[in-house]
Image (cartoon, rainbow, N blue to C red):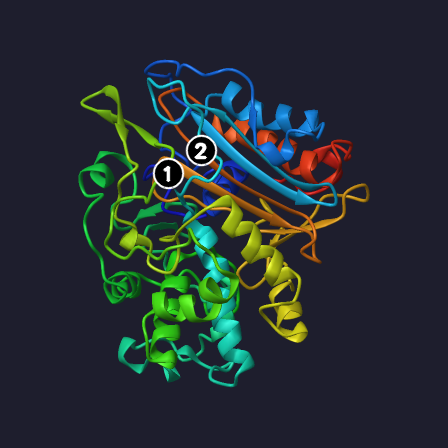
Amino acid sequence: MSRSLHTVKSSRARRPRAFRRTAVTALAAALLAGVATPAVATAAVAGPVNVSKAAAGQDRPELQKAVQAFVDAGFLGVQVRVHDERGEWAGSAGVRRLGASAKPPLDGRFWVGSVTKTFVATVVLQLVAEGAIGLDAPVAGYLPELGLDRRITVRMLLQHTSGLFNYTGDFDPDGTWVPGLPSTGKEWLDNRFRSYRPEELVRFALSKPARFEPGTGWSYSNTNYTLARLLIEKVAGRSFDAELKRRIVGPLDLKGTVVPGDRTRLPGPYAHGYYRYQDAGQWKVADVSRQNLSLLAGAGDMISTTQDLHTFFSALNGGRLLPAELLAEMRKPHPKSEALYGRYGLGLFVQDLGPACGTVLNHNGSPPAGYAALMYSTPDGGKTLTASLTAGDAAVDIVKDYPKLLDGLVRAAFCDGQGGSADEAEPAG
C-alpha cells in the first residue's frame, strides 16, 4: 500500500504506536483521508452478494458474509475472487457508482496501488537471476547520476531498509509527520492530474534527510520502488512498461494489467471510487475514478483485475516466474518490518495466520484515494484471494473496523471459514 494515504496531519506530538502502524503500511488508513469522520450521506446499497455463474453451485456462505461485511461497514463496492481446491468463486457487493443500483463488475479494472511493488520486485529478481543485477550490489553503481549513498543495495530497495525518505510523506524518528508531495486532502484533489517523472520523485526524496543509516532499520517508502523501476529501465534498456509486458504480462496473458503512465482513465468496465475531503469546513465528495498515478511511478501506479492478480500471484508463488533460491529470498521477512500484513520480504509480506490456517503471502495497496486492492496466496500458489474495494460517501472507521473486515475475509478464504481468531496470530490488517 502506498504510504501516500493517511489520516495523520503534521504535529510535534508522537503518535500512539497502534495508529502509527496503521499509517505506515497505509492500506488500513489509506482508502480515503477523513473516512473516520461523519458521513456526508449513507450510500444506498443494493441487495445481497452477486456471484459468478461458475460460483453459483458453490455453497460459500462464509465468503458471502465476509464480502457483504465491507459494504455494511460503509464501503461503496467490493469485488472478490477466490481460487482454491473447490475451483473459482467470484462475487461482488455494493454498487458500481453512487446513485446507481448495479453491482461492481466481477471483471472490473481498478487502480491496484502498492500491489505494483510485487510486480516490480519480481522483474528486478528476474534480472538478478540472469546476472544483470546484483542483489547486494550498490544501486549507485547502476544509477550514478542520482548521487545515492553507495551503501544502499538493491536488496535494501526491495525490502524497505534503505532509509530513504518517502516522497509522499514520512515520519521522523520522534514520530513527527513530515509532509511530502501532495497526496492527501484538497491539495491532492486539485493536483490529481499532475504528471510526475520518476526522477523528479526520487530527487525530491533525496532532498530530505534519510530516516536512518542504510540497512539499520525498516521503513516503508515509495521512493525505494520508484528507484527499482529506474533500475529496471537502466539495466534492461527499455521502459518498465515494455519490460513488464515482455516478462510477465505477455507470458501470463494478463489481459487487464496496464502501466498507464500519464493516462488518467480506467479502461472499462470499472467501479467508481470516491474521495471525501474537507473544503472550508464542509465535507464534500469527489469521483476520483480518474487520477494520474505517475505520482507513484513503480510504487503504486498500475491497473489490473482480480483475475490477473490471481494469475500473476499464483504463477509467482508456484515457481513459474523465479528460480527457487530467489523465491526463497523474496520470502525472507525482515524482523524490524511493520506487522500489519505480516513481515516484509522482497516485495511481499509473509503472514502467519496461526496453526489452523497456515502462512499466506500478500501485498495490498491503494492509490491516493477511492480504491484498494488485495492480493493473497498460499506458499504453493494453489489458493489465492484477490479483491478490489471502492470507497463512497459513507464514513468508515478505518483504524477500528478495517483490520477486522480484512481479517474476516482472509480467514474465510484460507481457513475454510473456521480459522482461529485474529488473536492467535498477527492481524491481517
**Reading the chain from its start, which is encountered first: label 1 or label 2?**
2
Residue at image coords 45%, 78%: 151
Q: Which mark is residue 247?
A: none
In this rendering, the answer to whether 366 lies above or below 400 is below
Badge 2 element = loop
Question: For this view, does 280 lie left or right of residue 386?
Answer: left
**Residue 62 screen position, x and y as percent:** 69, 27
Q: 106 or 196: nearer the eye?
A: 106
Q: What is the distance, in whole Å, between disc 1 and disc 2 at their CAs? A: 7 Å
Query: Could you tell whether 40 is left or right of 49 in the image?
Result: left
Q: Nearer the viewer, residue 254 or 112?
A: 254
Q: Position of residue 29 (x, y in %)?
A: 45, 36
Residue under the image location 40 percent in, 29 percent down: 391
Q: Position of residue 276 (x, y in %)?
A: 31, 27
- Specify the amino acid type for callout 1: Pro
The answer to whether mark 1 and mark 2 are in CB contact below 8 A is yes
Badge 1 crowding class, 10 Å Cα cut-off, few under 14, some 14 to 19, many 20 or more, is some
Work out whether 19 lies above or below 250: above
Mark 1 lies on residue:
269
Q: Is residue 422 visible to us here?
A: yes
Q: In this rendering, would 59 be left or right of 341? A: right
Quarter occupied by the C terminus: top right
**Tag 2: Cα neighbours inside 10 Å, few (<14), some, or many (≥20)?**
many
- Which mark is on residue 105? 2
Q: Is residue 173 above or below residue 275?
A: below
